[in-house]
Image (cartoon, rainbow, N blue to C red):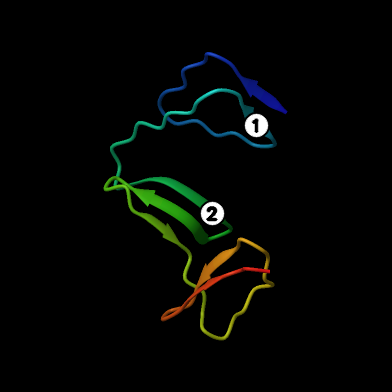
Amino acid sequence: MAFLRGQIISGSSTFSGSTSISGSLTIDGDASNFFIIKSGSSELLKANSDGIIQFNVYEDSYIPSSSRGGVFFHSSSMYIGLE
């Protein structure tokens, strides 16, 4: 596990394994999609420079297992796990 304390990282960096950040995290980017969480080639969650958060949109035939507080989207529907 890596711990980042008072470090400034600039340019392009790659982290693997576990990382713990204590305190605050500031992401200062100027790219159109500066924050992306991916699994393989699927973009699960991303934020663009306008502050828009976009979740992955699943195919209508796919229904993931539900979990309390979970959110997922189909092409025309949004689901929220309540129980």
Dividing the picture into quadrants, the one containing residue 65 is bottom right
In this view, the residue farthest toward the right is 1
Taking 25 as reference, is 63 left or right?
Answer: right
* Place of residue 43 in the rendered image (x, y in percent of width and height, measured from the top left): 49, 59
Residue at point 62% right, 68% down? 82
Q: Examine the rendered structure and indicate whether residue 31 appears above or below residue 37.
A: above
Residue at point 66% right, 63% down? 68
Mark 2, secondary structure of its residue: strand
Label 2 neighbourhood size at 10 Å, few (<14), some (14-19), many (20+)? few
Q: Name the one closer to the observer, 69 or 41.
A: 69
The label on residue 48 is none
Label 1 neighbourhood size at 10 Å, few (<14), some (14-19), many (20+)? few
- What number of labels is visible? 2
Taking 40 as reference, is 66 left or right?
Answer: right
* Place of residue 60 in the rendered image (x, y in percent of width and height, measured from the top left): 51, 84
Three-letter code, disc 1: Thr
Mark 1, secondary structure of its residue: strand
Q: Name the one closer to the observer, 2 or 23.
A: 23
For marks 1 and 2, the one nearer the N-term is 1
Which residue has dot 2 on it? 38
Three-letter code, disc 2: Lys
Dividing the picture into quadrants, the one containing residue 64 is bottom right
Label 1 – label 2 distance at C-alpha: 16 Å
Which residue has dot 1 on it? 19
Taking 61 as reference, is 35 left or right?
Answer: left
